[in-house]
């Protein structure tokens, strides 16, 4: 096993067969002022058990999606070691993030607060693509920008929109069965053997959710999903 890359919430190792091993850490992301937020790009601290919970939730959803016929890079996981094995994926450019917003909150309000207020239902849900660029706060990109920068083709953009909405709606419905309201969620895709698949993770660290009108923190949301 060879060290490959250090990430904010995971360290990555390359295995002899070409797969990658992701080792989940207890770091949490947020903003400069230290507040945890799945939409943040900075590591703002550590919370014991966050890595284990992220892996449990990610394994739960990848296994669920695989059963539904949704292609992912997931191979296996070992919760006792906080490790997940995945297929080595290639990013679009230097990385894109695909976001679905069901209810207005967070950074969306900062941009569009003139037209909506916190808690407004987005109908239809808002689909956004952003660059994976922490230094510039993950700027949003349009279909024209994606095409001009040779990140994805128009055909791929529309496919990714459909795939993202299908996946996020499935997760939203699963959370609703647990009494949880999904506000927004961030996903990533990449190429594995020339095929576009869901990659990275699906956990409390990349979604905002509420229950009984209260925002759920990392630990509480994770436990509600996997209990």
Image: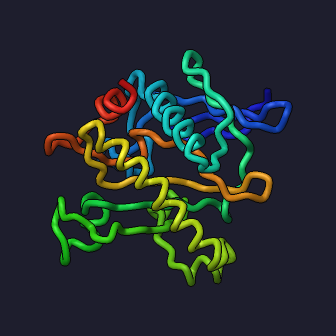
Residue 41 shows up from this direction: yes
Horizontal relation, residue 205 to residue 58: left or right: left
Residue at image coords 56%, 23%: 82
The residue that appears at 77% across and 37% down in the rendered structure is 19
- Quarter placement of the N terminus: top right
- The quarter of the image holding the C terminus is top left
Residue 172 coordinates in the image, percent (x, y): 36, 49
Q: Is residue 42 left or right of residue 184?
A: right
Furthest-front residue in view? 68
* Residue occupying the point 49% across, 33% down: 60
What count of labels does the image hold? 0
Where is residue 123? Give x, y as percent.
Answer: 28, 70
Please provide percent x and percent y for residue 5: 68, 40
Residue 34 in sight from this viewpoint: no
Q: Quadrant of residue 178?
A: top left
**x 68%, y 65%: residue:** 93
Colouring method of the image: rainbow
Q: Nearer the viewer, residue 213 or 64?
A: 64
Residue occupying the far right of the picture:
16
- Lateral position of residue 103 relative to residue 118, left or right: right
In x, y percent, where is residue 131? Answer: 54, 65
Quarter-of-image position of residue 214: top left
């Amino acid at each position: 096993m060879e060290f490959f890359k250090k990430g904010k919430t995971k360290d990555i190792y390359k295995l002899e067969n070409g797969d990658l091993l992701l080792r989940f850490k207890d770091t949490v992301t947020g903003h400069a002022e230290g507040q945890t937020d799945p939409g943040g790009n900075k590591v703002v601290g550590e919370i014991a058990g966050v890595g284990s919970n992220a892996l449990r939730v990610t394994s739960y959803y990848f296994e669920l999606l695989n059963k539904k016929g949704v292609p992912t890079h997931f191979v296996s996981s070992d919760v006792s070691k906080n490790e997940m094995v995945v297929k080595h994926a290639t990013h679009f450019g230097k990385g894109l993030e695909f976001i679905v917003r069901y209810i207005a909150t967070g950074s969306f309000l900062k941009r569009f607060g003139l037209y909506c207020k916190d808690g407004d239902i987005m109908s239809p849900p808002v689909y956004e693509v952003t660059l994976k660029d922490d230094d510039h706060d993950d700027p949003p990109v349009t279909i024209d920008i994606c095409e001009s920068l040779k990140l994805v083709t128009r055909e791929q953009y529309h496919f990714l929109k459909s795939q993202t909405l299908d996946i996020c709606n499935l997760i939203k419905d699963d959370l609703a069965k647990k009494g949880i309201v999904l506000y927004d969620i961030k996903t990533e895709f990449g190429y594995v053997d020339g095929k576009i698949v869901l990659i990275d993770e699906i956990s409390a660290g990349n979604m905002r959710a509420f229950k009984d009108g209260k925002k759920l923190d990392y630990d509480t949301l994770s436990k509600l999903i996997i209990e």
